[in-house]
Amino acid sequence: MAVSRIENLEIIKYPDPALRLSCPVVVDFDAGLADLSRRMLELMKQNNGVGLAGPQVGNRQRLFVCNHTGEPEDDLVVINPELSELEGWTEASEGCLSIPDVQINIRRAERCKLKAQDAEGHTFELWGEDLQARVWQHEYDHLQGRLILDYMDEASRIANRRIIKQLESSYKP
């Protein structure tokens, strides 16, 4: 991806069909991937997010970036993630940068293990708890083509109906 295209990346909004595509494994760990990751972190922070996945910027690579604390040293680039050892369960409200103004209560694991690669292709493993584990699970869903809307119960559908209809009616392919 050319640098000018990377600098022009924007967060795409629901119901863009790119948000529903499953992402293939990343095999090329080049400078373009590092540039993309850097730009995604910038976009995430500019929009007050804690995570951002490739599909949310129209990129079908299996990657996401996140930072659950807002501290620069906690920026994390996650490529080809695998989640395992999900433990404990808790329900909390989640939003999504691609579905503005929608909040959904979602039940997720309180703790999980993440195995992934960084932008240079080095493998790492981390354990996450609470918000960090929730962010990983949310962003992992994006790589599978799943959205928070898929977790809505009837009350959530009713509460968010107007906002979702507005997003759908304002969408221009």
Image: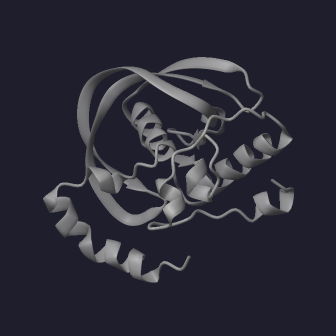
Question: Which residue is painted at 72% across and 52% down in the image?
Answer: 39
133 is higher (above) or lower (below) than 23: above
State the residue lying farthest toward the left: 155
| 143 to the left or right of 134 | right
Q: Quadrant of residue 112?
A: top left
| 41 to the left or right of 154 | right
Question: Which residue is painted at 27% across and 45% down in the image?
Answer: 106
76 is higher (above) or lower (below) than 149: above
| 160 to the left or right of 137 | left
Task: Pick whichever, 92 or 24, lies toward us.
Answer: 24
Task: Pick whichever, 70 or 33, lies toward us.
Answer: 33
Q: Position of residue 41 (x, y in %)?
A: 65, 48
Question: Which residue is painted at 72% across and 21% down in the image?
Answer: 122
Task: Pick whichever, 50 or 79, lies toward us.
Answer: 79
Q: Position of residue 133 (x, y in %)?
A: 42, 31
Question: Which residue is painted at 46% across and 55% down in the image?
Answer: 20
Q: Quadrant of residue 108?
A: top left
Instruction: Assign the C terminus to one quadrant of the image.
Output: bottom right
149 is higher (above) or lower (below) than 109: below
Q: Position of residue 34 (x, y in %)?
A: 78, 40
Q: Quadrant of residue 137?
A: top left
- Count of residue discs: 0
94 is higher (above) or lower (below) than 64: below
| 82 to the left or right of 100 | right
* Colouring mode (rainbow / by chain / secondary structure / one colour): one colour
